[in-house]
Image (cartoon, rainbow, N blue to C red):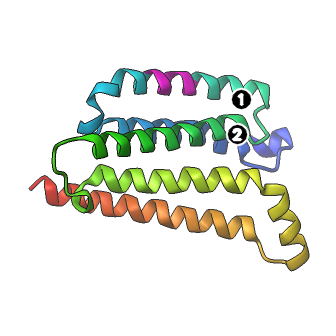
């Protein structure tokens, strides 16, 4: 399809994946027992974000990076992670955070969302540095964030397996 249309990128797939991935991450963290009281608001945020992301496909067009939807997803990821930490810290219940799977997921989501926002905010500066030094700084930052996020996700799944026994 890309060849027939004369388009040489995969941004449409990236944009759709971005909407699905951010919605899934927010939904997954919203399933934490600690966030039972906020589930209705979290589901509303997912719905609004998904609608915004689909509308953004038409505003910023299919074949360009939909930065508005990506940044809104990062903001929601930071907010839900911080809200999770707030609820856990205000709780009277003792929770071993190192063995709590949602804690690890929230840590990974927080760092990934904050790092992605910072890298996107300073993209022009990072591109100038890359052009002068021939070091792909933006790519290195995003790869490091991916390793951190998926590392935390792996730890979360290991904790989940241990806790479900």
Q: Nearer the viewer, residue 7 or 31?
A: 31
* Numbered disc in front, either 1 or 2: 1
Q: Is residue 128 above or below residue 118?
A: below
- Which is nearer the eye, 11 or 50? 50
**Is 58 rendered above or below residue 70?**
above
Occupied quadrant, residue 41: top left
Residue 63, x across and y down, in percent: 78, 39
Q: Quadrant of residue 150?
A: bottom left
Q: Where is mark 1, residue-wise?
A: 57
**Does 41 sit left or right of 163 as displayed?**
right
Q: For numbered disc 2, what is the local secondary structure? A: helix
From the image, give the main secondary structure of the stretch colored magenta.
helix
Say if 102 sits above or below 36 in the image: below
Q: How many marks?
A: 2
Residue 97 in the image: state x and y as whole percent.
26, 57
Quadrant (top left, top right, bottom left, bottom right) of the C terminus:
bottom left
Write the residue at 41% across / 38% down: 83
Q: Residue at x 40, y 50 (%)?
A: 106
Q: Is residue 128 visible?
A: yes
Q: Residue at x 58, y 68 (%)?
A: 144
Q: Position of residue 19 (x, y in %)?
A: 57, 36
Q: Which quarter of the picture shows residue 157? A: bottom left
Q: Are marks 1 and 2 in contact (CB under 8 Å)?
A: yes
Query: Magenta segment: does it hold 43?
Result: no
């Amino acid at each position: 399809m890309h060849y027939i249309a004369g388009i040489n990128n995969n941004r449409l797939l990236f944009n759709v994946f971005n909407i699905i991935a951010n919605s899934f991450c927010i939904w997954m963290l919203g399933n934490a027992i600690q966030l039972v009281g906020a589930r209705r608001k979290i589901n509303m945020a997912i719905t609004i974000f998904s609608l915004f992301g689909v509308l953004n496909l038409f505003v910023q067009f299919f074949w360009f990076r939909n930065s508005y939807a990506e940044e809104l997803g990062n903001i929601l990821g930071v907010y839900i992670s911080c809200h999770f930490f707030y609820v856990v810290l205000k709780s009277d219940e003792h929770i071993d955070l190192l063995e709590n799977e949602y804690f690890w997921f929230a840590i990974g989501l927080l760092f990934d969302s904050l790092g992605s926002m910072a890298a996107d905010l300073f993209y022009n500066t990072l591109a100038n540095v890359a052009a002068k030094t021939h070091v792909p700084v933006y790519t290195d930052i995003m790869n490091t964030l991916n390793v951190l996020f998926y590392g935390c996700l792996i730890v979360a799944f290991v904790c989940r397996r241990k806790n479900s026994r």
